[in-house]
Image (cartoon, rainbow, N blue to C red):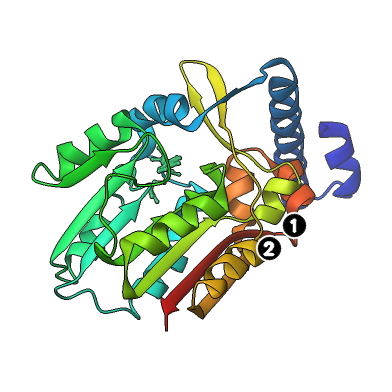
Amino acid sequence: MVASAYKKSGGQPLAFVHVFLYQKRCFNLVIKNLTTYIKHRIWPLHDKNAVEAYDLWAATYDSQPGNLMLDLDELVFSKMLNTIGLENKQVADIGCGTGRHWPKVFQKNPAGLTGFDVSPGMLEKLKDKFPKSNTRVITDDLFSDIKDSSYDVIISTLTVAHIEFMEDTLLAWCRILKDNGEIIITDFHPDMLALGGKRTFSHQNNRISVRNFVHTTALIRQILLKKNFQLIYQEELKIDESVKHYYLAQNALPVYEKFKGSPVIYGMHFRRA
Ligand SMILES: C[S@@+](CC[C@H](N)C(=O)[O-])C[C@H]1O[C@@H](n2cnc3c(N)ncnc32)[C@H](O)[C@@H]1O
């Protein structure tokens, strides 16, 4: 590397330092990407269902700086939340997890906020942060023990792709919503899941991926429009240069190249007419 830098710099000391440092950076990057590639080859992913996976993920879920999905979700969800009034309304957060969005929801003075989740571990973390909160562990997606027309608004962030039977579930959401109810959904984009995208995390030296189901945004729209909902707003964000640094920080440039141009997250806001 020294000889090559010397040759390229034409023997000029400053140019030599510049070229040498540049080549060293490139070399380090190649080694990092190679290490990540080999690690992923010999360190296989363990696929788990949502309950098992999130019970493990709960301990570290709230401390994930540089998590692309969480950062993009913050943008997409906040934008939709800002357009909706929650004063004196009953809100259900389905797949509430650790209540990541709850401070923003509470700021809008709802009459009540109920968190539903399949993972007791995630709800325990939520309870640590909001001890008086109203939460329920759910074991099916039909909300059989919830009365019709109980909620004004359902929010559900980064969750619906974990739900297997989308139509039955959305029909249950329609049932527990009041007549003029609203639904705000965000999630990992189905196109990305269809291309092999996964939600993954590390736990005790294991790489774990959470089982997902591909439900297109068209399917979700179709089910809700049939139940008299109108689509108020929809947004999709794509993998582009603006998020490349997330992949660089994870030594995952090949993943960036694979998914560049693909939508990564969507948000939809529906209101029943
Ligand atoms: C990626 S986390 C999102 C948590 C939170 N909404 C957020 O945005 O940070 C997905 C959550 O959905 C929950 N979940 C998975 N399947 C579910 C289902 N069928 N019904 C309700 N919650 C579910 C998981 O336990 C987990 O807490």
Mark 1 → mark 2, Cα distance in angstroms: 6 Å
Which corner quadrant of the image does residue 113 belong to?
bottom left
Question: Quick one: label 2, few (<14), some, or many (20+) residues within 10 Å?
Answer: some
Give the amino acid type for the residue marked by disc 1 in the picture: Lys
Q: Looking at the image, which residue is at 29% across and 60% down?
A: 148
Give the amino acid type for the residue marked by disc 2 in the picture: Asp
Marking on residue 111: none
Quadrant holding the N terminus? top right
44 left or right of 118 in image: right
204 left or right of 220 in image: left
68 left or right of 105 in image: right
* Residue 62, placed above or below residue 71: above
User: Who is closer to the viewer here, 1 or 75?
Assistant: 75
What element does badge 2 sit on? loop
Which corner quadrant of the image does residue 36 belong to?
top right
Picture quadrant of ligand 1: top left
User: Who is closer to the viewer here, 260 or 167?
Assistant: 167
122 left or right of 79 in image: left
* Residue 109, placed above or below residue 3: below
* Residue 26, placed above or below residue 78: above
- Tell me whether circle 1 and circle 2 mark residues in contact (CB < 8 Å): yes
User: Who is closer to the viewer here, 227 or 6?
Assistant: 227
What element does badge 1 sit on? loop
Q: Does ligand 1 reach within 8 Å of label 1's beta carbon?
A: no
- Does residue 155 appear in the picture of this structure? yes
Q: Looking at the image, which residue is at 27% across and 44% down?
A: 145
Which corner quadrant of the image does residue 226 belong to?
bottom right
Q: Looking at the image, which residue is at 68% across and 43% down?
A: 197
The percent position of residue 135, horizontal first and vertical second, equals 21, 43
The percent position of residue 156, horizontal first and vertical second, equals 40, 56
Marking on residue 240: 2
Q: Disc 1 marks which residue?
A: 260
